[in-house]
Amino acid sequence: MNRIDQRFAQLKSQRRPALIPFVTAGDPNPAWTVDILHALVQAGADLIELGVPFSDPMADGLVIQQASERALRKGMRLERVIALVRSFRLTDATTPVVLMGYLNPVEYFGWERFAAAARAAGIDGVLLVDCPPEEADSVRPVLAKHRLAQIFLASPTTTAVRLKRMAELAQGYVYYVSFAGITGADQMVLADVHQHLAALRNVVKTPIAVGFGIKTAAQAVALADDADGIVIGSALVEKLAIATDAKSAQQIAHEFLSPIRTALDAVSKPQAA
């Protein structure tokens, strides 16, 4: 059982959903990323998704596209992203970290080299947006060898065939995209999300985290009963873009996430003694 499984098991026993912030590695400044990650944990993050900057992030909206561009201009590449996690692990050995990105940087780096380096740095899982279950057979053994969870995306348009394959392969959690679109858009319809999550639970037995379009504590709370995890990305990345130094970046991260954690805890249902 890796850190992801341990964390979800712990949260399940507490009847609390995981709060999962997403940030782009190296944005707004590579020197601040580790400080931002620690601030998010202090504010109540249960897991962290760390975005690998890429020049053609097809699933991402303008906010994360611009964050990737800023990070790339500052020299962020996959090897440096891994190094940031290694630095984070010097003082945090428990918070699960998932790398989220696209196939191209990993393939260029080399799968075996990537998986070995990621595991050594303390990365727990990998979510590659453009690597669906039916195309994962060639990389799954490499990730499994290095005990990296391979996490998949499901959406309202995911076919029954793909969902079945996903259920067979899913590790860590399944990331449910709340609508068919790009990150950061305002298209989430809560009633539809509730319906799709109920259907997804009949197929997938791993925890389910919901993301895309979640920007406020109220939205997070509205999904808390149905989802095992709440992912918040674009709204946080947009706030961080105005940081002027490491201290302000930490403050922005903490002030953004802390009220969401408080709101989720207020509606959680602790296990009876």
Image (tube, rainbow, N blue to C red):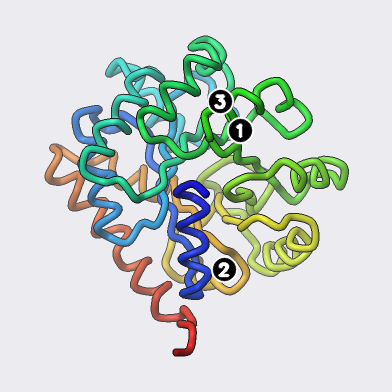
Residue at the disc numbered 3: 102
User: Which mark sits nearer the N-terminus, 2 or 3?
Assistant: 3
Q: Of 145 and 117, which appears nearest the observer?
A: 145
User: Which mark sits nearer the N-terminus, 1 or 3?
Assistant: 3
x and y percentages locating residue 200 in the rendered image: 75, 58
Q: Of 93 and 197, which appears nearest the observer?
A: 93
Picture residue at 46% right of the left edge, 65% below the top:
10
Q: Are marks 2 and 3 in contact (CB under 8 Å)?
A: no
Name the quadrant containing residue 234. Answer: top left
* Residue 141 badge: none
The quadrant the C terminus occupies is bottom left
**Relative to 43, residue 143 above or below:** above
Picture residue at 27% right of the left edge, 60% below the top:
43
x and y percentages locating residue 92 in the rendered image: 26, 46
Picture residue at 38% right of the left edge, 41% below the top:
23
* Residue 129 badge: 1
Q: Residue furthest bottom?
A: 273
| Left or right: 216, with 149 as reference point | left
Q: Are marks 1 and 3 in contact (CB under 8 Å)?
A: yes
| Left or right: 221, with 159 as reference point | left
Name the quadrant containing residue 145. Answer: top right
**Relative to 257, residue 36 above or below:** above
Q: Residues within 10 Å of mark 3 (few under 14, many from 20)?
A: many
Residue at the disc numbered 2: 223
User: Which mark sits nearer the N-terminus, 2 or 1?
Assistant: 1
Secondary structure, mark 3, is loop
- Mark 2 vs mark 3, CA separation in Å: 27 Å
Callout 1 amino acid: Val
Callout 3 amino acid: Tyr
